Image (cartoon, rainbow, N blue to C red):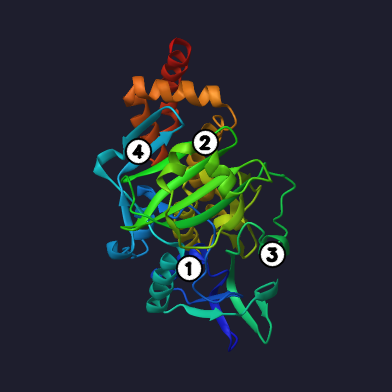
Amino acid sequence: MPQDATEVFVIGGGPAGLAVAIAARQRGLSVTVADGAEPPIDKACGEGLLPDGLAALGRLGIRLPLSEAFVFSGIRFLNSRLSADAPFPSQRCGISIRRTVLHRIMTQRAEQSGVRLLWGCPASGIQGKAVQLADRVIHSRWIVGADGANSRVRRWAGLETAQRPALRYAFRRHYRVAPWTDYMEVHWGDRCQGYATGVSNDEVCIALASHDPKIRLEDGLRELPVLNAYLQGAEITSAERGALTGNRRLKQVWKGNVALVGDASGTVDAITGEGLGLAFGQATALAECMYRGDLSVYEREHRSLMLRPSLMARLMLTFDRRPRLQQRVLRVFRKHPHLFRRFLELHVGERSPLELAVDGLTLGWGLLTV
């Protein structure tokens, strides 16, 4: 290989890019990661890892310190009048952690694994088996685009899609208040959803998503009285950050020696809480394909990984902007708690999407009779 060369070059040093780098090092490949930002890299997100995402992170050799995180045991849906909840199956749990803390931990793991990290070093283009940086060209057998939903790598590689996803507007902020529950909460309103997750023993992450481009976090909280009441008088501990979220599926996630991972390879709506876990699973699959020298297998693996989160996103978004349907579904879940438990089993990968058909009939009958 040329003097300045690597087997894998990852463009984008967020959690998805670092996950690919770590997984590739686990298979003995030399890896370089470049990002124009300086760590820690933050992003507006709900900051919760569901059990399947936590397991995917564990396969990368990463264990999150509970001293800097918060354990949650299930999910609760609420509106202004009703609630329904269920614990995760098999006594599993999720962990929520500040995005900046997660990035620090993953950066340390990448460094320990022998990944070369080039911070403050944006890539300006790719050509063949070479990546152009500001001051040099680095040759690489494999090039990975992990540079987010607006990926330049996707455009450079000719993997852009004509599909225009229906986007929602999301915001996130932290509050100094003790978590009032060990469940991840999803609060349903007429125009938005609010998500509440403890990230430590004295801090809660609040996220909000809506189709309304004019709504902001404070506006949304006024429409979610139950959630808003918990936050009264609490100190705000972070600036409000915004992002776009939605379902986006690409026709192809690789071409030649270039592959995409994380949001660069397609997205599921943040309502699922599966973004990070999905990226970690993709990273492991991609690293194995690069090790074996066949990216075509990654296409199939990627589609398989996206199937369940995409299904869950579509299913959960059917409640969006439908207050009467939200009310009826919550009543069914309260009347038939096993349905919510099975819904959660599907969400975390312990139930096949095919099994949803039977429960769907039960839910449909319940909606007619409540």
What label sits on residue 18 in the rendered view?
Answer: 1
Residue 174 in percent (x, y) is at 46, 57
Mark with earlier residue (1, 3): 1
Q: Residue furthest top?
A: 369
The Cα–Cα distance between marks 3 and 2, rounded to whole angstroms, is: 27 Å
186 relative position to 146: left or right: left
Q: Earlier in the sequence, mark 2 or mark 4?
A: 2
- Which residue in the protein does label 3 denote? 152
How far apart marks 3 and 4 lie (CA) works out to 35 Å
Say what secondary structure mark 1 lies in. helix
Badge 3 or badge 2: first in the primary sequence: 3
Residue at 33%, 58% in the rendered image: 202
Which mark sits nearer the N-terminus, 1 or 4?
A: 1
Please, what is the three-letter code of the amino acid marked with disc 4? Glu
Amino acid type of the residue tagged 3 in the rendering? Arg
Q: Which residue is mark 2?
A: 311
Rounded to the nearest angstrom, the CA distance separating label 1 from label 3 is 18 Å
All told, the count of numbered labels is 4
Q: Amino acid at mark 1?
A: Leu
Q: Residues within 10 Å of mark 1 (few under 14, many from 20)?
A: many
Instruction: Label 2: state its secondary structure.
Output: helix
User: On the rendered image, what quadrant is the N terminus found in?
Assistant: bottom right
**Residue 343 versus residue 176 in the image, above or below:** above
Residue 2 relative to residue 42: left or right = right
